[in-house]
Amino acid sequence: MSWLSENYEKAALGVAAVAVIAVGYSVLSSENKVPNVKGIRVENNVGIPEHQNLDLAKTRLANEYAFIPKSAAGNEVNSFTAYPLYSIKGRPEIDVLSNDFEIHEGMPIKWWTQYGLSDYTLANGPDLDPDKDGFTNRDEMEGGTDPTKADSKPHYLTKLKCTGAKPSGFVMSWTNVDDVKANFKFIYNGKKASYFSKEVGFQFPDAKFCNKQKAPGLLNRFEVVKRGVDPSIEGEKGQYYDIKDNLKQEDNVTKLYYKAQVKSDDWTVDLKIDINVGEVNKPFKLAEGDSFSLPFDKMASNKPFTFVARKGDKAIIKHNLKGVQSPLELTIPTK
């Protein structure tokens, strides 16, 4: 028996090893063919089964993940071009972060950057208060003030809020003294002389009253504009005065007959400055006709604002402040 017959398995393993070495050499060499080793069959068509999957992956990557150049504001945008962009949640498009772009409605980027603020990157940016003066970024922008300086802020009138209202009526009557003089009497809030120390006499015509009382809002509020006689009513009871209420914008003239009483509903409102800074937000009360300062100071010498009347669900505030709705209408909350 020959050596080959006795060592067939060893010979087969040797041949296989030579084949593997040949394939490895073909991969590492610059040629793409296996060299012809003597006694070994050359096979240059050895393939890798996963190779076709690699080609398929390349095709899919090219089709599904191809980079498509975009343009914005007339400029081509690609991965090698630096250009400020901004994407807002809920919007499919990409926006150019230009100075006029409004991430928050009505508030362009240039307003934020001129004060060195980056609050525009936050969802609640307009509601933040960098200088802690009680006015938000949006308040400051609308007021034309500096959001980084506490001494630069909109007027407190822009934060005035009505928190409640209740009626405070008065009763008015008059009696004759002579042909040109009469006494007028008030009962306010159901209490006689609580605002008037005595009956008030005045000369007609061109007479204003009241001129002596404790409620500043009633000072010279009423004016006698006409004296007359109603022919349909006999005797003294037919006499009347037309009384003008200088606070009322509509239906402000009332006929006040001799010894009769006219009842009217005034209102008292509760107001406050709606900010959380110091004690400027301390609530205060006003009767119709009362003037006041802001922050509220009962003893202030300058009181440029006046609660003139209630109209529907609004408290009407009269003022001459520029840049603020005039007259200012504050909503009266319903309970």
Image (spheres, rainbow, N blue to C red):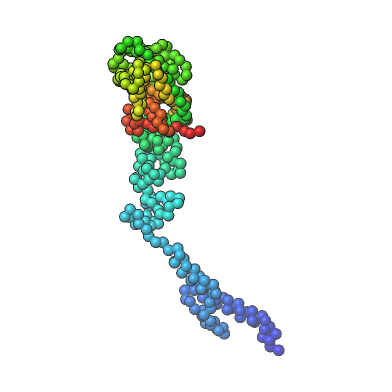
Left or right relative to 142: residue 14? right
Hey, which quadrant is residue 158 in on the image? top left
Location of residue 117 in the rendering, given as x and y in whole percent from the top left corner:
40, 39
> What is the quadrant of residue 187 in the picture?
top left
Give the vertical position of 95 relative to 222 (above or below): below
14 and 270: which one is in front?
270
Considering every residue shown, the one lying at the far bottom of the view is 1
Return the x and y of residue 65 as percentages of the image width and height.
Answer: 45, 63
Marks counted in the figure total 0
Res 165 visible: yes
Residue 325: percent from left, percent from top:
35, 33
Q: Percent x, y for residue 227?
A: 30, 18
Please name whichever residue, 93 or 311, is drawn nearer the observer in this view of the structure.
Answer: 311
Where the N terminus falls, by quadrant? bottom right
Q: Residue at x 40, y 54 (%)?
A: 93
Q: Is residue 152 visible in this depiction of the protein?
A: no
Seen in the picture, residue 118 relative to 209 is either above or below; the reply is below
Viewer-side residue, 177 vs 219: 177
Residue 287 appears left or right of 202: right
Residue at 47 percent across and 74 percent down: it is 30
Residue 263 location, quadrant: top left
Report the residue at 34% width, 24% height from top.
Answer: 253
Residue positioned 46% across, 28% down in the render: 165
Closer to us: 292 or 111: 292
